[in-house]
Amino acid sequence: MTKTGNGISILLLFAVLLGLAMGTYFPAYGQKLLPFTEPLVVTLLLLLFFELPLKPLHKATLNRNFILLAWVANFILIPLIGWGIASFIFGDQPMIFVGLLLYFLFPCTDWFLAFTRIAKGDTALGSVLIPINLISQLLLFPLYLTILVGSKTVFDLDGMWGTLVGWFLFPLFGALFLRILLTRFLPTGFFDSITSFAGYLVPWVLSALVFCIFSSNTHQLTAYSAEVPQILFAVFLFFLSSWFMGELLARYFRLTHPQYVLLAMTTAARNSPLILGLATIALPDQPLVYAALIIGMLLEFPHLTVLSRILQQQISRISSLQRNQATNI
């Protein structure tokens, strides 16, 4: 899965470069791709919602303290950290500020679990977080836009609500209905194969959306190319801050190492595909917002790969220390 994660980063980078090339050398064709954005967003949201597992929700009461800690970290502490970083670096550039903040705000609901498994984290508890995180961020998305974003932009946030609800409800209920229907009439193994295939399609549909965004908005995006190093620095600073926060929380609440790994991964990984889809709906024709989100995505998988290896080394050192102590006894 680590290789797959890095492969997604390469795929997204290729989509960005190909889109910029299309928009630069064949701008007329790049503009013709703009109408494909909306159906790609709907497809992306359908696939993401179709993957949502609802069964683990009933297990949330088995470890309420950790669930509450992870929720507070993901939806209160991390948004404050992200808002501080975005305000400090891009407080005078509202479009990039909004894109970065949207990237920072919402935790991942899928691939963080694979990296948690690699680093020997608590994947059973992580599966409980997935529906909780997804439902929470869908409910909080308009609220965060109003509270954290509204003061720095000229967006029509009141008009955004109706558009967002309409676009959101169709793929959500469509995906849930299809999931319930298929689980009822298909064998478990076959249904699992379908959900796996849906997950396989997500990065390809996401890359197609990224290609369309960059090819149809090349002029606006290249005008701000000087800000790319600052965006990269902001994302790096966010990853560093989230890791430091996880360290402090793990020590203060005396988490087990598997719980600590899970907390580190869920606060580091972001739900950029879903938020990119929602952003194109809620904030139409804002390519700088989308670009900041996409740049964050490009760094995320390499970061998660490095983080998983650091956590693996920690558990190896702990195991070695325990063996030495047992030998001395």
Image: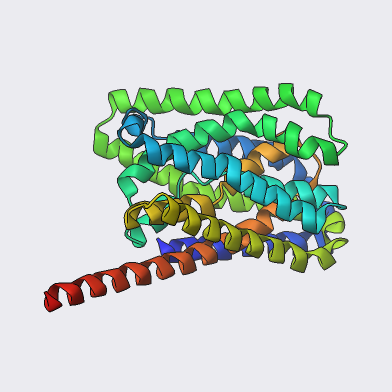
| Residue occupying the point 41% across, 49% down | 253
**In-front residue for pair 20/272:** 272
- Where in the figure is residue 238, as x and y percent of width and height? 63, 58
| Residue occupying the point 81% across, 55% down | 90
**In-front residue for pair 285/113:** 113
Position of 283 with respect to 171 (left or right) is right
**In-front residue for pair 56/216:** 56
- Where in the figure is residue 191, as x and y percent of width and height? 32, 36
- The answer to which quarter of the image holds residue 51 is top left
The number of discs equals 0
Residue 121 visible (yes or no): no
Residue 195 visible (yes or no): yes
**In-front residue for pair 272/142:** 142
The answer to whether residue 101 is above or below residue 325 is above
Position of 123 with respect to 162 (left or right) is left
| Residue occupying the point 78% across, 50% down | 97
Position of 189 with respect to 132 (left or right) is left
- Where in the figure is residue 270, as x and y percent of width and height? 56, 50
- Where in the figure is residue 281, as x and y percent of width and height? 71, 34
Quarter of the image with the C terminus is bottom left
- The answer to which quarter of the image holds residue 24 is bottom right
Which color scheme did the rendering employ for the protein? rainbow
Quarter of the image with the N terminus is bottom left
- The answer to which quarter of the image holds residue 215 is bottom right
The answer to whether residue 308 is above or below residue 97 is below
